[in-house]
Amino acid sequence: MVVRSYYLAAGGDRPVAGSPSGRTRRCILGSAAVVPAVAASVACGASGENQPAAKSTAPATLLMVTDRTGTNLDAQKALFARFTQEQPHVSFEFSPNPPGQSARDRVKIMHQGGTPPDFWESTRAAFGDMLLAGAVAHLTDYVRRDKIPFEKMFVPDHVDHITVQGKIYGWPVVISADALAYNKELFDARGLPHPPTDPNDKAWTMEKFLDVAQKLTKNDGQQFGFGGARSGFARLTDGTNWGQPPWDGKAKCLFDSALWQQAEQFWTDCLFKWHIQPTSAERPSLAPPSGPFFFNGKTGMDVVFGLPPANVGYRWGLATVPFSGKGKNVAGRLGLHSLHMGQGTHKDVVWDVLKWFRKKEYAGAYPMTWGSPVSPLLDGGSDLAQSEYQRRFGVDPKAFLLTALHAKRSGWGLQSLVKFTDYDPQIEKLYNDMFAAKISVGEYVRQATPIVNQMIDESQKILPITGSKV
């Protein structure tokens, strides 16, 4: 097994590793611009290209672009080595991303440069730009040929996320879900009951959350009931604690809805009115040496979505995210990660690798290489990941899994819009200004809503998608 670097050269016309002979950084970057494509080509243009061929046992080495490094990369290599043990004619080369460059950008450059990877992992919601570039091969013909019950196998919103105009463009492998971490020792010192794990617990409301956070706050600038982390992507999630999506899933932003504005007012009041979370001036002295802010030992509750530090010096647990909406608890967000097939010469072999992850022992082993205890595979697909998380950290991670079965993808699909990355910086700036008390909630809504609506309108004309279902 080989780890190969395909980093872009720092400058000039030096050859780029993995490029065709004589091709340089300038040449590859020049050809890497995404050529505008008609959305219909995504729907039907590549169907013939993906017709499955007869299974071959000829030797094949698959190139995988990966975001993993260090021990996580080692774990990923060890997992795929198990595939090679079962099918010795298949080996893998791993190409880790350099600092500051994502898999999505490298895949487009390699595809346009004539050296597409065989497959890669996505670690963010959007992949529409890669569809328009023609870099992603759809799996629909393979799924139909092998009679894979795809829609029944995985968390439904994950399937919706990777299905564009009726074609499947990835294999679900990881869900990064939100959960509420809480400090058991601070709760016990105040004689407070621990928050529930069950998302269906109707008593765990936003009002109850506020009451508990106020009781845990000492008002001395040293202990706070809430750390301030609301979600893994807060500006598109803030309203979900009241059951409010950020858009209608088709054409309209819902930031100007009464519930979304109520949510933003609540969260800003946590900082400025109730002061149950530290200000930007107070945070630096309270920050832990490593890991999320919650693990400073002085925070009662905070939303987390990644791994904790190796050694936490106090007892802590994971609970469901509070909810005051109607119906099912949809609070929080899901980061949906998939393996995508490239336009290389080993598509049939890549498909064999992807469907290998139907087995729970492999599907369950993958998420912790990324740092999550949740697999999108239903009916026990997360068992191994849940067990490994608890073994390593001594904390039951079931709350993450339950969030995955209740909440929706980050932004309810907004991040999948092809123009999202073009407009999001404007929204982020306004959002940060609101939480810096530079503008009011009303002013934020007034300015941000038309920006999001313009993003939706332009995106849907290029590559129409449907957002998460309520």
Image (cartoon, rainbow, N blue to C red):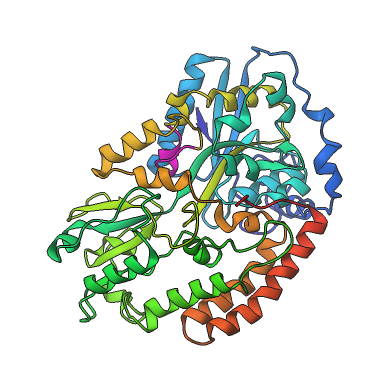
**Residue depicted at x 62% and y 32%:** 151
Residue nearest the observer in this picture, 211 or 14: 211
Asked whether residue 121 is in view, the answer is no
Residue nearest the observer in this picture, 107 or 174: 174
**Residue depicted at x 65% and y 33%:** 118
Q: Which residues are magenta?
A: 365-375
**Residue depicted at x 26% and y 49%:** 310
Residue 57's spot in the image, x, y percent?
A: 64, 12
Dividing the picture into quarters, in which one does residue 203 lie? Answer: bottom left
Asked whether residue 300 is in view, the answer is yes
Residue 98's spot in the image, x, y percent?
A: 53, 51
Taking the magenta stretch, the answer to whether it contains residue 362 is no
Q: From this view, report whether residue 459 is shown above or below residue 97.
A: below
Taking the magenta stretch, the answer to whether it contains residue 370 is yes
Single out the residue that lies furthest toward the bottom: 438
Q: How many marks?
A: 0
Horizontal side, residue 211 vs residue 31: left or right: left
Dividing the picture into quarters, in which one does residue 344 lie? Answer: top right
Horizontal side, residue 202 vs residue 216: left or right: right
Residue nearest the observer in this picture, 203 or 429: 203
**Residue depicted at x 63% and y 45%:** 161
Residue 73's spot in the image, x, y percent?
A: 44, 39
Horizontal side, residue 56 vs residue 360: left or right: right
Dividing the picture into quarters, in which one does residue 247 lie? Answer: bottom right
Q: From this view, report whether residue 430 is shown above or below residue 343.
A: below
Residue 290's spot in the image, x, y percent?
A: 30, 60
